[in-house]
Image (tube, helix red, strand yellow):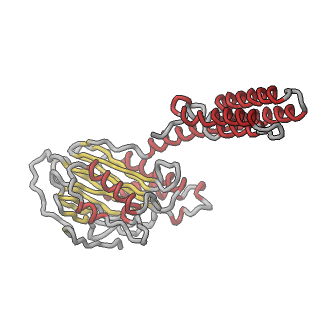
């Protein structure tokens, strides 16, 4: 089991006793070897290795303790050899004291830096948690599971986004992908998420909801702070989804985003629209608004929402991850959490353990229907195992 660092930035004595034995054993071995060596061979200067080695895994206190033991061992060697007060032994002691002191100082500085970095990371993670709020496991008649992988090191979120809002009649979901990476993408993602959460609960139509997101994004991109950036080329692909509690159906408005998949038993259906809406943030007054499509979504069905970081993950031969085939081929799809965990692990195996882009995955399963509406006929091209055909985005 991997050991964990303590609050001071070094490694805890209780979980690293085996490692701490190494510098102590070096002190004993060098001391004994020097005593047994001929008079013209001096091994005492090698004792500096002990505090230097301790600094690689220990804190300042442990390094200081090992340094003190090294100094004590050198004093013993000097006394056994001839006298502590010879010029040779005095120079060795001074050098060991100085090097040990500098090593302890550097350890202390490292501990302060580590503590500051840990605090900054905790604040950043809290902020990221607020921006990309975790989805609840249950919402209305739905069970939900999600996974996220940011391409930026040490980040919890990136340019991909998702959110869910409960309304009086059902649940509304959003999944999207901001063009670009880094802080500008996170800023745009936070803006769209805030606008969605503010507007979705008022239950406008999906078309009107998209218009509100568009207005918010265009307002942000017109601000002076955006000058000198690539704001004019920024946009967000997104899918807006409305799942009523009282009808076995789902309403989808696709704004240039990879289409969701519906999993029913062993069949996967691509829920692609007849006409896409343009991405959010294009700020084109005469652009087509797209069509809100209605698809059957019965109890037991699963809706797989994803970003292109999932569907375009590449293997060593530069091939794309076959999401639809892998979802259809997975035999144990009883729960959204199980399917999300399978896809997450499968993608990591497929692409060698690293993501080249931000990736988000959300799986929604309908459990019940509160009303008595009959299920509408299934829509969209059906994908049966093992052969799956793909529809490309326009």
Locate the N terminus and report the quarter of the image it occupies.
Answer: top left
Task: Specify whether 87 is left or right of 381.
Answer: right
In the image, residue 169 lies at what x, y percent?
A: 22, 45
Question: Residue 390: in sight, yes or no?
Answer: yes
- Kindly identify the residue that appears in the image at 79 percent across and 27 percent down: 80
Q: Quadrant of residue 117?
A: top right
Locate the C terminus and report the quarter of the image it occupies.
Answer: bottom left
- Kindly identify the residue that appears in the image at 66 percent across and 38 percent down: 55
Task: Specify whether 92 is left or right of 246.
Answer: right
- Of 58 and 330, the residue lying toward us: 58
Total numbered labels placed on residues in the image: 0
In the image, residue 191 lies at what x, y percent?
A: 46, 50
- Of 187 and 23, the residue lying toward us: 23
- Of 384 and 78, the residue lying toward us: 78
- Kindly identify the residue that appears in the image at 61 percent across and 59 percent down: 227
In the image, residue 63 lies at what x, y percent?
A: 67, 32
207 up-or-down from 27: above or below: below
- Kindly identify the residue that appears in the image at 49 percent across and 42 percent down: 125
In the image, residue 270 lies at what x, y percent?
A: 25, 66
Question: Residue 115: in sight, yes or no?
Answer: no
Q: Residue furthest right?
A: 87
- Of 325 and 170, the residue lying toward us: 325
């Amino acid at each position: 089991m991997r050991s964990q660092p303590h609050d001071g930035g070094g490694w805890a004595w209780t979980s690293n006793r085996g490692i701490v034995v190494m510098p102590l054993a070096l002190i004993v071995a060098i001391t004994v070897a020097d005593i047994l060596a001929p008079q013209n061979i001096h091994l005492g200067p090698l004792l500096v290795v002990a505090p230097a080695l301790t600094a690689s895994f220990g804190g300042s206190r442990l390094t200081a303790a090992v340094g003190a033991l090294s100094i004590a061992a050198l004093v013993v060697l000097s006394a056994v050899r001839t006298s502590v007060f010879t010029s040779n032994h005095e120079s060795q002691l001074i050098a060991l004291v100085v090097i040990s002191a500098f090593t302890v100082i550097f350890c202390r500085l490292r501990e302060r830096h580590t503590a500051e970095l840990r605090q900054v990371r905790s604040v950043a993670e809290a902020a990221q948690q607020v921006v990309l709020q975790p989805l609840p496991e249950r919402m209305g008649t739905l069970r939900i599971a999600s996974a996220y992988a940011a391409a930026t090191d040490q980040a919890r979120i990136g340019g991909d986004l998702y959110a869910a809002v409960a309304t009086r009649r059902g649940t509304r979901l959003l999944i999207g992908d901001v063009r670009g990476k880094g802080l500008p993408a996170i800023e745009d993602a936070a803006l769209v998420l805030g606008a969605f959460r503010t507007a979705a609960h008022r239950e406008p139509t999906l078309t009107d909801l998209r218009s509100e997101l568009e207005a918010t994004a265009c307002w942000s991109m017109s601000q002076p702070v955006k000058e000198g950036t690539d704001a004019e080329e920024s946009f967000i692909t997104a899918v807006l989804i409305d799942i009523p509690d009282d009808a076995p159906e789902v309403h989808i408005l696709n704004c240039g985003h990879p289409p969701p998949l519906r999993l029913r038993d062993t069949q996967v259906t691509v829920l692609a629209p007849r006409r896409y809406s343009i991405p959010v943030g294009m700020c084109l007054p005469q652009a087509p608004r797209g069509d809100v499509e209605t698809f059957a979504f019965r109890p037991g069905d699963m809706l797989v929402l994803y970003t292109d970081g999932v569907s375009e993950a590449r293997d060593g031969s530069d091939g794309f991850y076959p999401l639809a085939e892998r979802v259809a081929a997975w035999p144990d799809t009883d729960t959204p959490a199980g399917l999300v965990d399978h896809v997450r692990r499968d993608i990591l195996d497929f692409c060698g353990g690293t993501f080249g882009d931000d990736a988000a995955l959300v799986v929604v399963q309908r459990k019940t229907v509160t009303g008595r509406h009959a299920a509408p006929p299934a829509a969209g091209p059906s994908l049966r195992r093992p052969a799956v055909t793909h529809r490309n985005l326009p």
